[in-house]
Image (cartoon, helix red, strand yellow):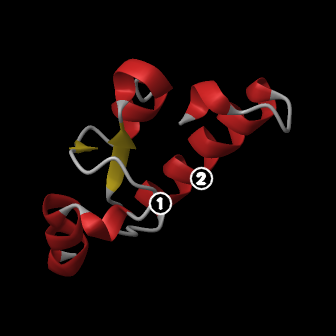
């Protein structure tokens, strides 16, 4: 939902997300990355998918990621 950000500087937010993703790989923290309605909200930016390549495109258009069974099952698996 990066395209909808209006509350802060997008470059700072994007850099913080990239740094956090890099930290998860260094610390070996499991991550489930999901997107919701990328046609309207924008795709996950490539810098992030280079670090976390698997993105679950949620089919249920709701903010709660656990409403989407694939995303929920991925979290349970990790």
For numbered disc 1, what is the local secondary structure?
helix
Q: Which mark is residue 7?
A: none
Camera-nearest residue between 76 and 59: 59
In the drawing, does residue 9 fall left or right of residue 25? Answer: right
Residue 52 occupies quadrant? top left
Relative to 73, does residue 37 appear above or below in the rendering?
above
The image shows residue 16 at horizontal and vertical percentages of 70, 43
Question: Which residue of the protein is positioned furthest toward the bottom in this rendering?
Answer: 76
Q: CA distance from mark 1 to mark 2?
A: 6 Å
The image shows residue 8 at horizontal and vertical percentages of 86, 36
For numbered disc 2, what is the local secondary structure?
helix
Q: Which mark is residue 24?
A: 1
Q: Is the C terminus in the top left, top right, bottom left or bottom right quadrant?
A: bottom left
- Please name the residue shown 79% across and 31% down the image: 6
Question: Which residue of the protein is positioned furthest toward the front in this rendering?
Answer: 61
- Please name the residue shown 60% across and 24% down the image: 3
Q: Give the residue at mark 2.
A: 20
Neighbour tally class for label 2: few under 14, some 14-19, many 20 plus, Cα within 10 Å: few
Asked if the residues shown at circle 1 and circle 2 are in contact, with their CB atoms under 8 angstroms apart, the answer is yes
Camera-nearest residue between 71 and 46: 71
In the drawing, does residue 72 fall left or right of residue 2? Answer: left
Neighbour tally class for label 1: few under 14, some 14-19, many 20 plus, Cα within 10 Å: some
Relative to 58, does residue 41 appear above or below in the rendering?
above
In the drawing, does residue 60 fall left or right of residue 7? Answer: left
- Please name the residue shown 64% across and 30% down the image: 4
């Amino acid at each position: 939902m990066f395209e909808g950000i209006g509350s802060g500087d997008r470059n700072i937010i994007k850099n913080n997300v990239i740094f956090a993703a890099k930290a998860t790989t260094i610390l070996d923290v499991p991550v489930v990355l999901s997107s919701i309605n990328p046609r309207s909200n924008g795709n996950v930016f490539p810098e992030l998918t280079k670090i976390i390549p698997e993105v679950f495109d949620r089919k249920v258009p709701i903010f709660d990621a656990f409403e989407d069974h694939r995303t929920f099952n991925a979290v349970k698996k990790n």
